[in-house]
Image (cartoon, rainbow, N blue to C red):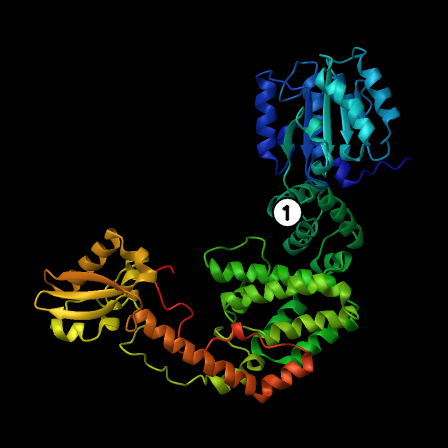
Amino acid sequence: MADTHQVLARKWRPRSFDQLVGQEHVVRALSNALSQQRLHHAYLFTGTRGVGKTTLARILAKSLNCETGITATPCGTCSACTEIDAGRYVDLIELDAASNTQVDNMRELLENALYAPTAGRYKVYIIDEVHMLSRNAFNAMLKTLEEPPAHVKFILATTDPQKIPVTVLSRCLQFSLKQIPHEQIRERLQAVLTAENIQADTASLSLIARAAEGSLRDALSLLDQAIAHGGGILEEGSTRAMLGAVDQGYLFALLEALSAGDGGRLMGEAEAMAARSLSFDAALQALATLLHRLSVIKVIPDYSAEDEPDAGRMQALAEQFSADALQLHYQIAVQGRHELAWAPDEFTGFTMTLLRMLAFAPVSRAAALPVANQAQERVWPEKRERRELPGDTVPDVQRARGTVASDDAALTNWPALVGRLGLNAMAHQLALRCELVGREENGISLRISKADERLFDKPYRDRLTSALRGLLGKELRVIFSTAETVEASPKAIIDRERAREQDAAEKQMRKDPFVQELLNDFGGALDEGSIRPKGLPDKPEKGGQS
């Protein structure tokens, strides 16, 4: 008895526009064109592998030749539709340009195009991977594209449209097919398994959908493999083994050790992965994916993925890192994967990436890493009190804005007063750069440097004046003037203090024995620009722009 088994990618290949997944924008455009009989002589479908280029071309061929007429919904039962589905329709010619690159092949095809269709309404030529044609073959095609016979339609497909001559591109109606989101792939896989009466857990479908990287065809092929590997059912452990995917448990353990600053445990987990002969390239890819999902949870707390099997554990892990730490670790993981080929061996490259995460973790993270902090604690102890700046110049627009009881008391400390005005944007920048130079009965004099004179626009002065009147509770007259430099503006004060703090921090960091040991052991260099003394914000002009 003949084997009638069909692989899932062929068995479940879409046969109509409504069965296509993830390409709604292309389907809508083609359906409208077919319904309105607005047909083009040449179509170009671009996109990565397995997103539906050839499938779409065959459905379009059915739409053009269906015996019910040109339609966006071919019947699927007439001889034209069934023969196209079976791949034996005489007026549908499919050419693989990768194996037919020469000009002679193209000339033969174009000569046959001159003859009327044998059975259908149109002769349809599907040329796959058209970018592989030689220059002469493209030139031969160009004449037919310029003056095509009325009974001929060309459908070109490619994964690399950049290699197609612009003279050809300009004569085609181009549609770009996008990679299919993994959620849609997962839903399609679930529908296929339901129809096939095959059991599968959610984690397995998610793993396959992500591994397919936007290709539904690849997803169905992987699904076939997973079913065979699992003996007719899909379970997470079996699917991971088939894919060569790293167990999530290892990734969670790595990040938990990283969060705790436990270098010994971090290396132990890496050695356990090596003992299992796991792919470190796959491990870094999976680690980057996990860090991305943790970042989403951290930055967008309301967002939740329905297909997330470890949602609770991920939520707990996300709370152990700050948003900037997750961003940095993601960048290190991606860069580490890129450098893996240049490492002495994969294990060294992988562990060096982990050590980089450990050594360069952001200080601002809530659960700061001890390895990163051992040196910094000497410079900026956790319980060290912040050095107060004159007038508490760090602006705080959240501070209460009640009316000041005494004008003189308020104006004694101009930097503190600026922090209470509640200004933003450019008016706030103007206030930060002004210094108080005089007071009189119903007015004050403010001065700004000529370098910042661009902030003297009337709208900004009016907003500052209005804020001062609102805070001081009276019709205050404000006189503005300029000078070459100003020394007592809030910005000037905080800039001087920041420079002193920065200089002290860099000196202490350079002298710290732990830092020297770290640099010697790993052959690194101290990036002084990354040192941030505690007690001062990175950008004192809170609420404005420089």
Residue 383, above or below 234: below
Residue in the foreground of this view, choosing between 6 and 301 = 301
Farthest residue in the front direction? 484
Name the residue: 69% across, 73% down.
Answer: 352
Most distant residue in the top direction: 116
Left or right, 87 with reference to 258: right
Q: Quadrant of the C terminus?
A: bottom left
Asked if one can make out residue 388 in the rendered structure from this viewpoint, the answer is: yes
Q: Position of residue 296 (x, y in %)?
A: 52, 58
Left/right of residue 332 with respect to residue 375 in the rendered view: right
* Residue 247 seen by the camera: no
Q: Nearer the viewer, residue 68 or 137?
A: 137
Can you give x and y, in whole percent of width and height, for residue 398 in the image? 28, 66
Q: Is residue 155 left or right of residue 494?
A: right
Q: Amino acid at mark 1?
A: Arg
User: Outermost residue toward the bottom?
Assistant: 513
Look at the numbered disc 1 and give the secondary structure of its residue. Answer: helix
Answer with the quarter of the image where residue 428 lies: bottom left
Residue corresponding to mark 1: 186
Q: Nearer the viewer, residue 209 or 224?
A: 209
Q: Position of residue 437 (x, y in %)?
A: 20, 70
Quarter of the picture containing the N terminus is top right
- Residue lying at the far left of the rendered structure: 441
- Residue 245 occupies quadrant: bottom right
Q: Which residue is depicted at the point 70% across and 34% down?
A: 53
Q: Quadrant of residue 99?
A: top right
Name the residue located 79 percent from the left edge and 54 percent from the top edge.
Answer: 229
In this rendering, the answer to whether 286 lies above or below 145 is below
For residue 335, above or below residue 268: above
Image mark count: 1
Local crowd size for mark 1, using a 10 Å CA cut-off: few (<14), some (14–19), many (≥20): many
Please provide percent x and percent y for residue 220. 73, 44
